[in-house]
Amino acid sequence: MQDLSILGHHQGDNSLRYRTAEEEETARARDCIKRFRAQVLRDNSLGASDLDTIDYINRALLEEAVKFAESSPLPAPEELFTNVYVSELA
């Protein structure tokens, strides 16, 4: 798995070009997924194996979605703006 520690807004974006290392560290300390994991382990809502299973299932679903996307044909140019703008207000 690739090292996500240097990613910013997209895969090739090194956020340390516009943020300090301290800002990155502060943001990572507030990571909602890590905080959720710590909280449910602390209050025994879920066990580590439960969380690991959820992570495993989600990773498999993501890999399946990526395979589907990569094996799908590119849309036709006339589809460029399909489902981008609301055509009718309800």
Image (spheres, grey):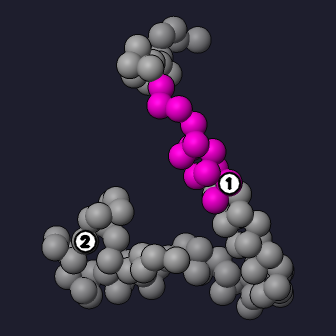
Q: Contact, CB < 8 Å: mark 1 with mark 2?
A: no
Residue under label 1: 64
Residue 79 visible in the current orientation: yes
Q: Position of residue 61 (x, y in %)?
A: 70, 57
Total labels drawn? 2
| Secondary structure mainly formed by the magenta segment | helix
Quadrant that contains the C terminus? top right
Q: Residue at x 68, y 54 (%)?
A: 64
Q: Quadrant of residue 33?
A: bottom right
Q: Earlier in the sequence, mark 1 or mark 2?
A: 2
Distance from Cα at disc 1 to Cα at disc 2: 27 Å
Report helix, strand or loop for mark 1.
Answer: helix
Q: Which residues are magenta?
A: 63-75
Residue under label 2: 14
Q: Position of residue 84 (x, y in %)?
A: 44, 24
Q: Residue at x 73, y 72 (%)?
A: 56
Q: Is residue 46 left or right of residue 17?
A: right
Kind of residue sitting beneath label 1: Glu
Kind of residue sitting beneath label 2: Asn
In this rendering, the label closer to the viewer, 1 or 2:
1
As drawn, 52 above or below 14: below
As drawn, 52 above or below 89: below
